[in-house]
Structures are given as structure tokens and as C-alpha cells.
Amino acid sequence: MAERYGPPVCLRMIRLIIAGIIVYVIYRFSRFMFTPAGKISKNHSGEQSEIEEEELVKDPYCGTYVPINSAHKATMNGNTLYFCSRECLEKYMKENG
């Protein structure tokens, strides 16, 4: 009788397929984790488009950077100023108003 070495061929193929799936999942996860956010994304049609990054503005009172969409706004001498909070806006207006 011939001696068999190792598992049958079908079991080896199943192990190979499972190992391939695991390697692919690890690859996709690592690519997701280490790709810079906000650079390029693919829309549903497969075309690449740049994601707009939210602009940050500096609060003139405390120096904090705040997203422009959530900043408290005030206009002085025709210039729009952006503040991180209502308190900073009021303190600035009190000192410079």
C-alpha cells in the first residue's frame, strides 16, 4: 500500500482559500487604517473625487482653531471674525468694540 503524506487535496485547497481570504481582509483593513482621511474617495460610479476638507479659522481672542462651519461669527469694520465660543466673541467685542 502507498502511504499518504498530509491531508487530502480538497482539504488543502480549502485551507489555501481560507488563508487567501484572511490575507485579503488584513490587507483591506490595514489599507483603511493607514490611508490619510479626506484625500481621495471613490463615488458609487467608480470615479475618483476629492473630498472637501473643512476650513479652519483662528479665533482672534484665544488663538484656537475652529471649523468655519461651527464658528461664532461677528463683523467688525467690514471684516468677518470667527470665534470658538460665544464667550470669546463677547470678551473680544468688550475689549475691542
Image (cartoon, rainbow, N blue to C red):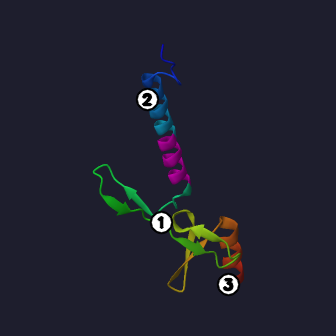
Q: Disc 3 and disc 2: Cα gap in Å?
A: 76 Å
Going by the numbered disc 1, the residue's amino acid type is: Glu
* Earlier sequence position, callout 1 versus callout 2: 2
Name which residue lies at 56% across and 53% down: 33
Q: Nearer the viewer, mark 1 or mark 2?
A: 2
Q: How far apart are marks 3 and 1 (CA)?
A: 32 Å
Return the x and y of residue 4 as percentages of the image width and height.
Answer: 51, 20
Residue 7 position (above or below residue 42): above
Which residue appears at 47% of the width and 33% of the height? Answer: 16
Label pair 3/1, CB-CB below 8 angstroms: no
- Residue 96 point in image, percent of width and height: 67, 84
Q: Give the range drawn in magenta.
A: 23-33
Residue located beneath label 2 in the image: 13
Name the outermost residue toward the bottom: 77
Q: Distance between the residues labelled 1 and 2?
A: 46 Å
Q: What residue type is labelled 2?
A: Met
Q: In this view, does 16 lie above or below 45?
A: above
Question: Which residue is under mark 3?
Answer: 96
What crowding class fits label 3: few (fewer than 14 Cα within 10 Å), some (14-19), or many (20 or more)? few
Query: In which image quadrant can residue 97 be found?
Result: bottom right
Element under label 3?
A: helix
3 and 2 marks in contact (CB < 8 Å): no
Residue assigned mark 1: 53
